[in-house]
Image (tube, coloured by chain):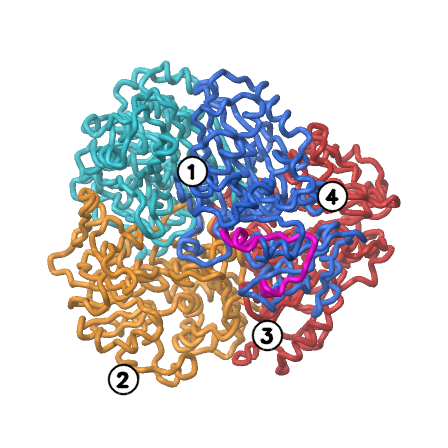
Chain colours: A blue, B cyan, C orange, D red
Amino acid sequence: MPLTNDANAADAAAVDTETDADALTATVVGGSGFAGGELLRLLAGHPNFELVGATSREYAGKSVGSVHPNLRGSDLRFVEPGDLDSADVLFAATPHGVSMAQIEEFYEVADTVVDLSADFRLNTTEQYEEWYDGHDAPDYLDEAVYALPELHREELPGANLIAAGGCNATATILGLYPLFEGDLLSGDEQIVADVKVGSSEGGAGASKAGSHPERSGVVRPYAPTGHRHEAEIEQELGASVSFSAHAVDMVRGAAATCHVFPEEPVSKGDLWGAFRGAYEEEPFVRLQSGGSGVYRYPEPKAVAGTNHAEVGFELDPGNERVVVFSAIDNLVKGTAGQAVHAANVALGFEETAGLEFQGLHPVGSP
Amino acid sequence: MPLTNDANAADAAAVDTETDADALTATVVGGSGFAGGELLRLLAGHPNFELVGATSREYAGKSVGSVHPNLRGSDLRFVEPGDLDSADVLFAATPHGVSMAQIEEFYEVADTVVDLSADFRLNTTEQYEEWYDGHDAPDYLDEAVYALPELHREELPGANLIAAGGCNATATILGLYPLFEGDLLSGDEQIVADVKVGSSEGGAGASKAGSHPERSGVVRPYAPTGHRHEAEIEQELGASVSFSAHAVDMVRGAAATCHVFPEEPVSKGDLWGAFRGAYEEEPFVRLQSGGSGVYRYPEPKAVAGTNHAEVGFELDPGNERVVVFSAIDNLVKGTAGQAVHAANVALGFEETAGLEFQGLHPVGSP
Amino acid sequence: MPLTNDANAADAAAVDTETDADALTATVVGGSGFAGGELLRLLAGHPNFELVGATSREYAGKSVGSVHPNLRGSDLRFVEPGDLDSADVLFAATPHGVSMAQIEEFYEVADTVVDLSADFRLNTTEQYEEWYDGHDAPDYLDEAVYALPELHREELPGANLIAAGGCNATATILGLYPLFEGDLLSGDEQIVADVKVGSSEGGAGASKAGSHPERSGVVRPYAPTGHRHEAEIEQELGASVSFSAHAVDMVRGAAATCHVFPEEPVSKGDLWGAFRGAYEEEPFVRLQSGGSGVYRYPEPKAVAGTNHAEVGFELDPGNERVVVFSAIDNLVKGTAGQAVHAANVALGFEETAGLEFQGLHPVGSP
Amino acid sequence: MPLTNDANAADAAAVDTETDADALTATVVGGSGFAGGELLRLLAGHPNFELVGATSREYAGKSVGSVHPNLRGSDLRFVEPGDLDSADVLFAATPHGVSMAQIEEFYEVADTVVDLSADFRLNTTEQYEEWYDGHDAPDYLDEAVYALPELHREELPGANLIAAGGCNATATILGLYPLFEGDLLSGDEQIVADVKVGSSEGGAGASKAGSHPERSGVVRPYAPTGHRHEAEIEQELGASVSFSAHAVDMVRGAAATCHVFPEEPVSKGDLWGAFRGAYEEEPFVRLQSGGSGVYRYPEPKAVAGTNHAEVGFELDPGNERVVVFSAIDNLVKGTAGQAVHAANVALGFEETAGLEFQGLHPVGSP
């Protein structure tokens, strides 16, 4: 990485990771937000990418470290969106609606575009009309691949347009996917996804509801019904899910608890079989169901800062219910890490390249 | 209240509230725990009770303020359980199993017993055999009244044995009760209660899982299935509920999100009708569904420290689902406040006596 | 209090406290901020005041409960500042600069004005020129009384203009005052006040630095030198204090740790003598120095929501140092509660009237 | 690293980092505590170390991931202390007193010992008699090198016994060191160090004071005077410092605010000169003083999970005071990271090897 720190040159050693001679160049559009900052962090430490640019209208001319204190060792500075140099891969972390409006400009900068917004996650204009405000660039929907490698590993190699999934959708999909793959659910059941999320999901802006005095210590229902991530979940699982999200007092993290009532009785063995079948070979999914110690089920704390997802389950025979737990870091596995992981697969890199951080213990609110 | 502070006499003015000339005497068994501390606080400020005793094996001889810093203005000291003087009303905040073993001793101290444990909440020995380890004093089950005045106001006057409900059960019951009362649910539906709770539910002890470094910032599934509060909920609502609890980063509070799928379509009007019908006259239940501002749905923060419950709902027509939210302070409405409220009703006092505190805004983790 | 709730009439019982027949009417200018909300809460529960009005430009026409969820039981609605009816006492919780500009309008509304801003705290225009941007209504400086009853009890009776102290200044002054009163400090020493404060000090607005993701879990120096509260502290103590404030992760609370190096050796006995001499008769100051249990020294948690201050000290013979700790709730003892306390003294009410709340145990981030 | 995960083999890819062919073997005594867990994390990801063992009496036979969820990808299991195999380097993270009692056993296991306790930090038995309970192995005091490379880089190469500094001492020393190096302080001044620390400083045990309900949201003075870290600070700086620590609501982090009153006036230029002179070439110290944005001064959040220290200062001409801020992650720069950094220097590795993690933004309570 070409990150050096003018003022404090020795510092750069710690940021710099050795980049392969044949690394690809990467650039980030929308680098001052939380997801953009995570992209910068992950790409700066990635052996196969050379981070060459980052845009921000608000902070153009300032160092990336002036916004993201963990990047103070870097001398990269934000530029205006129009001043972006070419790169091999463009990562976009812009608000919804921007990427669909600018996709052609993006392709002028780079051959491969990885988009973190919702603009290319859904397959059809009909879905965008139902859940969003339609779509400005419908011709690109066909070529876009939903990023989640656990579901789309075969389609990613060579993809030119990759759409990272939504954080809440990712947590929910990863929890429920084995039940569908393992034929324990048909899709006709009533499925509840009760999701708890951190404040970073609200983005880097300022709002009264998001201010510390009002947001601390909450269990606050938001978008209790009709959340747009239901569209992705339904698309990826082939079944509709009754989704509700709650803000809780953490900064990073999304935890989904899915309550399902299979039509046929299932055993613990069936569940272990389904989850192992789905994830045994996955580098970023850990099964965590019961056992001893403090961390017995999936928890956002246990994966904070990492690209790992934890999934687990419990059987409730008395209510003929299966409860599935899943936990991710919304900014990593839920967006920027998922994007890098998918790019690794698409470009033929080691899947785990740049995503090796294992997290911390103990850690407070992640 | 006879609370005075030797060391700092002027302080007592603030603790002391005027007690009616014909106040009843009250004593607290198990006063050093969190629920016991809340009982002491509420009784010390109650116009119709004179607080005359508190027991604690561990802290006998020490002032109640040495354990509960908010009671430093009081000169009451803990005594050994065997040294308890007679009183009109005995409130017991002991671990489960103690009250059923000591109920006869309790009645030697007082004519009226208000128990905060699970020992007298269920109606039958069969339930105790199914959910607990049986019952030691089954003869008393018939005379015990489940405290929640919103459901049992008619049975409380004159009751000698009152059993305060469990905190999670209380939150869940208050959320779902209007749907049953309003005939919007029959009891045959699959009902999910996804509950988020604060760390005070774990009690005043010390454990590794409950230590600050491990417990901060969590979304941690605990007792994901088979929670004993299911027994109370089923008893009170006449329907089984699929219950799962999660520890989140707050100290006080229980928030229940119930997901139900009525067999017949329901409208928002039906829901408003059911909730208003159930709670319009209730002094401690507030309807909070949507609207503007930061606090649009029930939140534990909004009721922290108070005996209020907030309930609200949202309709999800696409999934034929109703989502019900309810929030309480687990230590007040969920236990000690509920006990005092029920005692007020049982003894003919003003229902809201001693429970006037309206809470704070803003407040952090409640 | 005339607070009733149209939608939920039974609720009003809990908010309503009995008001004396000869209660004075009170009105609040700037009722939508955090300090204003606390004034509304305290006045609504005050036996000697009848709360009759509250202004807010932003929320005029809305109920006070739409902003402050703990006041949902009230039917009071905000009015535009110009629509304020007359009252006996006007409490102003406006940003600095407003009260000095509007003091004459305030006196048209009420005979007694209690101001929570900095506009009338300092005695002279010179101080305002040094620390602020001068003063618009210097003629009123002479009649203003600094609210803190522990220092100004004798001057308050009959005062027409009362200026509540700053929250950080209050914590610092209460900690150091006994050392000056007890002649243990002369004022020539180097005195350090290292203060830790909650996020509610930043007010009810929205800012990036105050957003939950950026503000959570911080120990953040702010205004590390040159804090305007130094002016008040110097005025009240007659000595200059080197003041630095840090934002920490709580919502309510200000804790001052003062490090002083007396010129002559002092003993623990000297310190106990000085602190007892200063506060023995004070209804709202508690000495808390060492001892057993969890809460051995002053802590904001132990006084959250109350008008109490805790003060304590420790002797460091090896460094010839005395460390003084003091803790308050910045929104109560540090502003609105101090204002009500001072008004009680000024108007001849019971000192503790309306300020009886003793706080909660346990409580999270206060 | 030889870490593989039996149950979830693919997972290991992410934990494994490539180890040099000529890596040294390392083992950790006391691996189940917080500092021990950090050693395991850092050594598992270190290119020059092969982690071959970890001891824990309590968890012998269990995987390291059963205690530290971030290490679930590892198949390393704790062994009893007596079952430890030889290694090139032994890192000890045991309670104070253990290393001095077992230093000879340690040397039987490894030629190089890095101790994280206080047992070899002080130079003389006199100091141990004054501040601790004497010393059991005084012969080893001479050969021990205090780890902090910013002060002892020249003495570390070839050292056989390295003593990592205390976390609070490290924060304080790093803040004040430039003032002594730059001759802005003589050591005769009154120097106050007011330190704010996270709950992980209390270690991995269970206590009532450290339980989540009691520990959340605190500003709690602890060891307000007479803290043992004063001994180290005095030793390293040659001056005594009046030290006080406060527990605040974070898990990781130590922030020191030092208030000093230089005998001669100093300018901002003097300060910049002193700090740049001390740290310009340091890979793990960042100067952060003022500027724009949210993070203007040193903050624990900005360095959480990293081996970085942030230091900064502000001049207070009115009080002839300099305020110095410093912030570290107590478990990394304050202990395990400092140990690895010193080992890197001692053994001739790249200084930053294994310590490249740059931290996260945003992050909650670190």
The image quarter containing residue C230 is bottom left
Above or below, D291 relative to C200: below
| Residue at the (44%, 26%) spot, across then down | B227
- Say what amino acid the circle numbered 4 marks: Phe
Q: Secondary structure at mark 4?
A: loop
Instruction: Return the residue at label 3.
Output: D322
Q: Are marks 1 and 4 on the same chain?
A: yes
Specify whether C6 is left or right of A251: left
Task: Report the chain holding disc 3.
Answer: D
- Say what amino acid the circle numbered 1 marks: Ser
Say if mark 3 contacts mark 2, CB within 8 Å: no
For residue A101: magenta?
Answer: yes
What x and y, as percent, mark residue C220? 53, 62
Q: Report how many numbered discs are placed on residues in the image.
A: 4
Residue B281 visible in the displayed image: yes
Q: Are marks 4 and 3 on the same chain?
A: no
Above or below, A86 relative to C106: above
* Disc 3/disc 2 C-alpha distance (Å): 38 Å
Say if mark 4 contacts mark 3, CB within 8 Å: no
For residue A157: magenta?
Answer: no
* Disc 1/disc 2 C-alpha distance (Å): 59 Å
- Say what amino acid the circle numbered 3 marks: Val
| Residue at the (12%, 60%) spot, across then down | C22
Q: Secondary structure at mark 2?
A: helix
Instruction: Return the residue at label 4.
Output: A349
- From the viewer's side, name the closer residue of D225 and A153: A153
Say if mark 4 contacts mark 2, CB within 8 Å: no
> Where residue A244 is drawn, which disc sits there?
1
- The region drawn magenta spans A79-103
Task: Report the chain holding disc 2.
Answer: C
Q: Nearer the viewer, mark 3 or mark 1?
A: 1
Q: Secondary structure at mark 3?
A: strand
